[in-house]
Amino acid sequence: MAQQEKDRLMDHDADGIREYDNDLPRWWLYGFYFTIVMSLIYVFYYHVYFGPDWNVLWYGPRGQANEYAAQVADAQASMAAAPKKAAVKAVLLTDKESLEKGKAIFNGMENLCSTCHREDLGGQVGPNLTDDLWIHGCSLEQIMANITTGFPDKGMLPYGSSNKLSDEQLMQVASYIISMRGSNPPEPKPVDETREILCDRDAAPVQ
């Protein structure tokens, strides 16, 4: 009797196809109720409620500013937990092979140094790197630091084009730049009056 009630046919048919009048499976029905409940919670949490974030289940911070702050906090925690790299001592390289590698990096299309400073370092969009007046310091460490961070507010990305250089490559290209001081390229970029740091060309580099 129960089976007959479960499989009771509806009165209508379509081209001989008839439909049973069975109850919906409970798993489907409970899933449907669950989606209704979660939809109401979602609407309330993201569009009605303005209190503190719940920070439970999978609900993240609401709003772009909060999401950004949470991502920054996660990134900082990840960086703090990452194994620390041993500091590499900066050493001015003077051998021909290292300077040639530095020149190749400076003039290459991976880091785009020469597109702003010219291949002869005489300056174009970027300043002349062969004279004695500098803005941000001219020691090996300062040049390496400047290459690493760049000056985004002036159009220079980290590493020139965001293509990261190894510590050795940084020393090579910085050493090459230092080796070109006083090379007096033709028609250099005029000295910027804001370049106040006078570099002593004959002074021993800081190491």
Image (tube, rainbow, N blue to C red):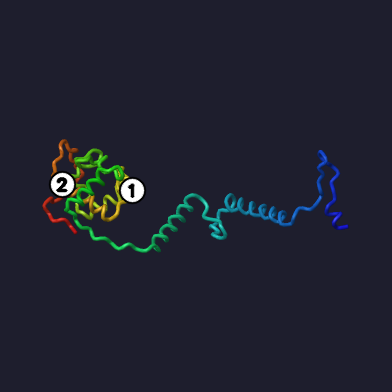
Question: Which quarter of the image is occupied by the N terminus?
Answer: bottom right
Question: Of the residues tagged 2 and 1, which is closer to the observer?
Answer: 1
Precedes in sequence: disc 2 or disc 1: 1
Count residues near mark 2 (Cα–Cα under 10 Å), then give few for <14, some for 14-19, many for 20+. Answer: some
Which mark identifies residue 80?
none
Q: Residue furthest left?
A: 202
Residue in the image at 70% along x and 54% along y: 33
Tell me if 10 is positioned left or right of 118 in this view. Answer: right
Residue closest to the eye, 188 or 13? 13
Residue named by callout 2:
181
Circle 1 residues within 10 Å: few <14, some 14–19, many ≥20: few
**Which numbered tag is attached to residue 163?**
1
Q: Residue 47: where, in percent of width, then height?
A: 58, 49
In the rendered view, tell whether residue 122 sits above or below residue 37. above
Q: Nearer the viewer, residue 193 or 9?
A: 9
Toward the right, the furthest residue is 1
**For residue 35, side relative to residue 135 (left or right):** right
Q: Position of residue 4 (x, y in %)?
A: 86, 54
Quadrant into which the C terminus falls: bottom left
Dots 2 and 1: beta carbons under 8 Å? no
Amino acid identity at mark 1: Asn
CA–CA distance in space, label 2 to label 1: 25 Å
Q: SS for tag 1?
A: loop
Q: At label 2, which amino acid type do we have?
A: Arg
